[in-house]
Image (spheres, helix red, strand yellow):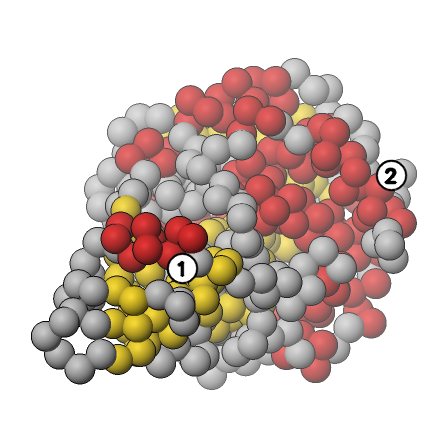
Amino acid sequence: MAHPNASLAAFEQLWQQHHWPELVKAQLSYPDIAPVLEQLAQQPAVTQQVIGQSYLGTPIHRLSIGHGPIVVLAWTQMHGDESTATAAVLDWLQLLAQDHVGDLPKQWQSLLTLHVIPMLNPDGAARGTRENAQAIDINRDAMAQQSPEGRLLADQVKTLTPTLAFNLHDQNPYYAAGQDGEPATIAFLAPAYHPDKHVDAARLKAKQLIACMAQALSYWLPEAVGRYDDTYSERSFGDAIAGLGASTILIESGAHRHDPYRQIARRMNVMALQAGLSAWLSGVYQSYSLADYYAIPDNVSDGYVDVMIHQLTFDDGQHQPFTADVGIVAQDQGYYVDFVGDARGQRGLTEYDGTALTYRQPLKLGAAADELLTLVGGAVLLDRNW
């Protein structure tokens, strides 16, 4: 069955045809996106500007399309190892620049100006680190602005005064969309701008728009969209920008089963951004309520591990045998034991039935899980229909 929104369904098909295949990678750095930036800059509808440099001197670009009074600002990869949305915004701009606009009004470029900073932290991207080359987390630099990248983002917000702001990140793969939900492939948040979590007019609009975007994604991601915790963080850019009056939306890209490069989250980012822009211009988002926003399941941390082995028997020949679940996580290109015991409330992105198996070696938390994975190689792979 097709998506109930025919325009969004058609836009998804256009993404399949026109996304940038060279960006299908686990991690993107500046050399990966530089050729794409050059090609986008050749599109008549797109303007490109180098708006500054990273700590190590790598250029930071801003791409813009449209010339209307509503200003929309999106930025990605302020954490260098979070590149899913970088590919997504470049896909989105490619579609818009080629006049594949879905159900946006024909005159949409006269209604708004869209600015995109596709890689705010190229130094961290080159190193595969969250932080920049100073070891500073840019997203905790909104107040001190000790990083050139943080100062640059603050200056862009001050200069452009966005009405709508998209803060795009990746989250770890272990979040669940609610206690019993699937891995949270996308999580949204309208960040607080005050410790009391007040809801002013701009934040109300952000929550309504998120509810609309989440509904648009629910066809593709049933039980896989979460709502991030809104604890106020005065050092964080999303919270700070919300405090300046912009309707600010955080989108976190997460895991999906059998999708190591997060290409499903990449595609869902494009669909969410397109649905959000359309709803903003049409005013459709205003039909959604705070209740719709809070109906989005909580983004539950530690709801998953990479591999879960259920009911494995342990018998080292020296002690009383016992049966337990084993959780395994991937770290530093290896797999390690994260949990042994009763795993109710936590699941695996991949799960095995270990009831017919016996592990005969002592086991320690943090130990390499190679022998365990070899043991379950012939076990029954559980299908959770995710």
Name the amino acid, label 2: Gln
Q: Is residue 189 visible?
A: no
Lateral position of residue 372 relative to residue 36, left or right: left
- Label drawn at residue 108: none
Residue 170 location in percent, x, y? 46, 52
> Residue at point 60% right, 33% down?
90
Mark 2 element type: loop
Lateral position of residue 180 relative to residue 370, left or right: right
Residue 244 location in percent, x, y? 52, 62
In the image, residue 370 above or below residue 106: below
Name the amino acid, label 1: Val
When asked about the image quadrant of residue 164, the answer is bottom right
Task: Locate the N terminus by quadrant.
Answer: bottom right
Residue 81 location in percent, x, y? 37, 43
In the image, residue 261 above or below residue 164: above
> Residue at point 43% right, 73% down?
346
> Residue at point 36% right, 30% down?
53
- Label drawn at residue 107: 2
User: Earlier along the polypeptide chain: callout 1 or callout 2?
Assistant: 2
When asked about the image quadrant of residue 174, the answer is bottom left
Task: Locate the C terminus by quadrant.
Answer: bottom right
